[in-house]
Amino acid sequence: MTTAGVPVRWRLPTMAGAAVALLGGLYAALLLLGVPVLAPPSPVEDVHGPVMVLGFAGTLIALERAVALGRRWALLAPASSALGAVVLLAAGPVWPGRLLMVIAGAALLGVYLALWNRQRTLALLAQAAGAFAWYAAALLWLAAFTIPEIVPWLATFVVATIAGERLELAHVVVLGRDAERWFRIALFALVLSATATTVAPVAGTHVFGLSLLAVTAWLAVFDVARRTVRATGLPRYAATGLLTGYAWLALAGLLWAGAGPAHDGARYDATLHAVFLGFVISMIFVHAPVILPAVLRRPLPYHPVLYLPLALLHLSLLVRVVLGDAAGLEPVWRWAGTVNVLSLLLFAACAVTLSIRRTRTPGTTDRTGVLS
């Protein structure tokens, strides 16, 4: 796919917006954890979830899709989500910020429609379903639904999108008709059950958890990461993050399927962070060495140091869920959550350092391999 239609200088403002969303979202996380940091004038803790999911991860996904399409109008999606995140961080959950997230979701659907006209694939269908979930979540939030009520839609956005990207970008094994059929069934069940959580929250959430388990099982069975985890370099690093992320996604599915909806408390904390930290952030970590160079045209070579933030993320999340949420040890929960934040900052520092080093020594080689 051509990238000539979207100059790099046009991409940088949206990347800057994503960076602001990340830093603002992490700052809000510290406030929610009760860490003694300076309180901001706006209630940023009230928008922590949408800023991280749509403002940060959503902007990265929408920008990558805009670059893949190669049309400048496609930047409306990441630009709207990045600007929406800035508005939400500056003023709290005001309607202009929420409206910008609706516009971003609608624009991303337009991007997928244009891509669909080029090539109709199962992977693209899954990603389009994710964009629809983004639009639905933002529209419900604009219509005064609470954040806990739209969480299944936010989860559907990231799960469907990442599942589609695994098909498109990550060399998932060649599929037979039966495998494709089961993927379509699991994807349809995920979107349908997310809808059910809006109209029948209790029953719908149980079914949504089962649907999430179905998607996770499909990925665990058919993703080539099960094989490349025995490789070396980037393929092994990527496979490690992928398989660990699938384990966290399975935990979230079990919690939703077995216990139903939760709008606050320890189970809410465990379920949300299993999806959006254990799964989503792990996916960002392992796909960054391939996706970011394609978007920014700057190298991000693989280096074993990238295992450090990945391990820190998963170990601290394990402590948070087991000792903090399940055992009710609040000080441990607070410290583990703080380490969650530090793991993201550490990954960003590693990525910037590796990129700068590679740029200064362009003639060197690195063990990048192929993303598993």
Image (cartoon, rainbow, N blue to C red):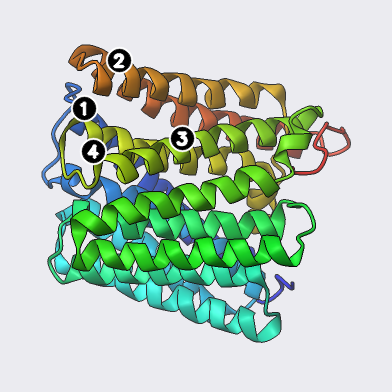
Numbered label attached to residue 33: 1
Q: What residue is shown at x 21% (from left), y 13% (from top)?
A: 329
Amino acid identity at mark 4: Tyr
Front disc: 3 or 1: 3
Secondary element type, mark 2: helix
Q: Please, is residue 144 above or below residue 43 in the view? A: below
Q: Distance between the residues labelled 4 and 1?
A: 14 Å
Residue 183, given in percent of the width and then of the height, sits at: 60, 61
Secondary element type, mark 4: helix
Tag 4 residue: 268
| First in residue order: circle 3 vs circle 2 | 3
Q: Quadrant of residue 137?
A: bottom left
| First in residue order: circle 2 vs circle 4 | 4
| First in residue order: circle 4 vs circle 3 | 3
Numbered label attached to residue 248: 3
Numbered label attached to residue 109: none
